[in-house]
Image (tube, rainbow, N blue to C red):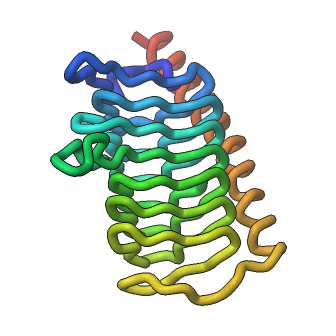
Amino acid sequence: MTANRTDVTIIPLHGHAPRIHSSAFIAPGCRIIGNVEIGPDASVWYNCVLRGDVNRIVVGARSNIQDGTVIHADSPKEGLPDGHPTIIGEDVLIGHMAMIHGCTLEDRAFVGLGSIVMDGCRIAPDGMLAAGALLGPGKAIESRQLWAGRPAKFMRELTDEAIAAMQAGVQGYVVNGRLHREALDREAGDGAAQG
């Protein structure tokens, strides 16, 4: 995690403190609240909000939550005692300014920039929601499917090349997160030396 906590808001709430792996990159401007778990080499980019106040949020290893994304969950209620936590698996790509709410993104899922994923949805491994799409409550994208539109609908099967490109993007974000962390640590060190 970034060394300078003044850039990041981390708030325990309702007896739950965010659990962030030491190798994760949390960018300045992020707000991480309550029952949130962030795994190894995951990255949460500038000005994201992960609000685990009414249910839990899990972000798996090497997954990236890109700039301006909002992640929340759905609270337990009558007939749905567990509500809808937000569970993000490993090696997941979530594009800039996405809205992720009470859903499951399985390992290697992809959510395009500006997309919305609503309560009870599931994106299977190697499934993709296109940029700007809206996946309505309870919908499921199966493995290797591309869905697009508002509301999102099945468009086509993904090629091996498209899946390989998604995973290359995951690895790129792991490396980029390390580079940003090093740059921020250098800046913090320079500031301390000048003070």
Q: Residue at x 66, y 48 (%)?
A: 91
Q: Residue at x 47, y 45 (%)?
A: 87
Taking the image as drawn, is residue 69 in sight? no
Residue 102 on image: x %, y %: 34, 52
Front one among 48 and 158? 158
Horizontal side of residue 97 vs 185, given as left or right: left
Quarter of the image containing the C terminus? top left
Horizontal side of residue 158 vs 23, given as left or right: right
Residue 160 on image: x %, y %: 83, 73
Q: Residue at x 50, y 32 (%)?
A: 38
From the viewer's perspective, is residue 126 above or below residue 131?
above
Seen from this angle, which residue lies furthest front? 79
Q: Toward which corner of the image does residue 16 lie, by quadrant?
A: top left
Front one among 49 and 53? 53
From the viewer's perspective, is residue 72 above or below residue 110?
above
Taking the image as drawn, is residue 160 in sight? yes
Seen from this angle, which residue lies furthest bottom? 155
Q: Toward which corner of the image does residue 142 lie, by quadrant?
A: bottom right
Residue 26 on image: x %, y %: 48, 33
From the viewer's perspective, is residue 141 above or below residue 49?
below
Horizontal side of residue 131 vs 51, given as left or right: right
Q: Toward which corner of the image does residue 7 lie, by quadrant?
A: top left
Q: Residue at x 58, y 19 (%)?
A: 22
Q: How many marks?
A: 0
Residue 100 on image: x %, y %: 38, 57
Front one among 13 and 183? 13
